[in-house]
């Protein structure tokens, strides 16, 4: 007996995804990081692959297995992540789920910093490049669909709407990461999909779901958009 054909609605599409935290070195043995597990980005990569896409996942340091059938590039810092993202273009869809460190240490120590009688060594921070904004504002190689995330602990929808405008992406997946939700590092996510519809900003609030369910739902929206706009 023949099996029914597996639907592969994203066949022929290249999808780029960032995931995980970044590590910003202080010296050869220390770094600045955050609580991102990478689970949401990895789940999106698996869902896009299951939908038939060619998937490139650029991930910061995580404790997760590479998803089957996905090309994974492992990086440490925000600047390395940007470099690999740029090298992966052109793509049809770019989804920026990484919790990129906003700052890196400007005066990174070449050797391990030592305790001295002079007290604590001052760390000078400089802002990292904004990968999502950089790619959203590209001329020529801008992917036709650019999706960002907004992790907020307060004023979720308002902050996410202004991020959509400021960064120039097409959609924002807004998620509440206040400590009580247990989202950072946890298995569930409460998200709102913020997009532009006829010049207005539309907010679509989803029920609490597992990160796999959020990934499946997000990819379903991508599939619909690809079909509607024939991306
Ligand atoms: N992002 C990025 N590069 C950065 C910072 C953020 O690509 N240097 C992306 C994230 O992957 C996410 C989106 O931008 O898709 C929003 O990240 P977020 O940290 O919520 O926004 P910021 O602009 O960094 O603002 P803030 O942290 O001050 O809220
Ligand atoms: Ca940030």
Image (cartoon, rainbow, N blue to C red):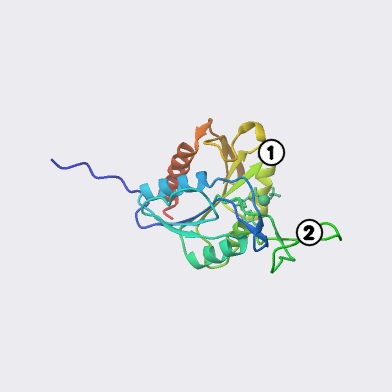
Kindly identify which residue carries mark 2: 115
* Separation of marks 2 and 1 at Cα, in angstroms: 35 Å
Q: Quadrant of residue 154?
A: top right
Q: Quadrant of the N terminus?
A: top left
**Number of other residues with Cα within 10 Å of mark 2, as a class: few under 14, some 14 to 19, many 20 or more:** few
* Residue 24, position as x, y percentages in the image: 65, 59
Q: Quadrant of the C terminus?
A: bottom left
* Residue 227, position as x, y percentages in the image: 40, 49
Judged from the image, the secondary structure of the residue bearing numbered disc 2 is loop
Residue at image position (60%, 50%) is 99
45 is higher (above) or lower (below) than 73: above
Confirm if mark 1 falls within 8 A of ligand 1: no
2 or 1: tag closer to the N-terminus: 2
In the rendered image, the residue lying farthest to the right is 118
Judged from the image, the secondary structure of the residue bearing numbered disc 1 is loop
Nearer to me, 74 or 229: 74
Q: Which mark is residue 153?
A: 1
163 is higher (above) or lower (below) than 143: above
Residue at image position (55%, 45%) is 37
């Amino acid at each position: 007996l023949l099996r029914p054909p597996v639907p592969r609605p994203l066949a022929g599409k290249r999808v780029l995804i960032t995931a995980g935290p970044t590590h910003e070195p202080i010296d050869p043995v220390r770094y600045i990081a955050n609580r991102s597990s990478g689970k949401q980005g990895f789940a999106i990569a698996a869902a896009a692959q299951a939908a038939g896409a060619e998937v490139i996942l650029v991930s910061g340091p995580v404790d997760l297995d590479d998803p089957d059938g996905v090309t994974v590039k492992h990086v440490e810092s925000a600047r390395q992540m940007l470099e690999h993202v740029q090298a992966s273009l052109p793509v049809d869809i770019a989804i920026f789920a990484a919790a990129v460190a906003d700052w890196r240490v400007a005066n990174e120590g070449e050797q391990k910093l030592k305790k001295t009688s002079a007290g604590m060594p001052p760390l000078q921070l400089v802002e990292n490049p904004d990968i999502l904004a950089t790619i959203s504002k590209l001329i020529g190689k801008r992917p036709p669909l650019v999706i960002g995330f907004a992790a907020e602990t307060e004023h979720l929808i308002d902050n996410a709407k202004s991020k959509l405008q400021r960064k120039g992406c097409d959609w924002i997946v807004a998620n509440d990461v206040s400590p009580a939700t247990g989202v950072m590092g946890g298995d569930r996510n409460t998200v709102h999909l913020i997009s532009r519809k006829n010049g207005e900003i539309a907010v679509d609030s989803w029920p609490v779901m597992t990160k796999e369910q959020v990934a499946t739902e997000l990819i379903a929206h991508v599939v619909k958009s690809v079909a509607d706009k024939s991306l």
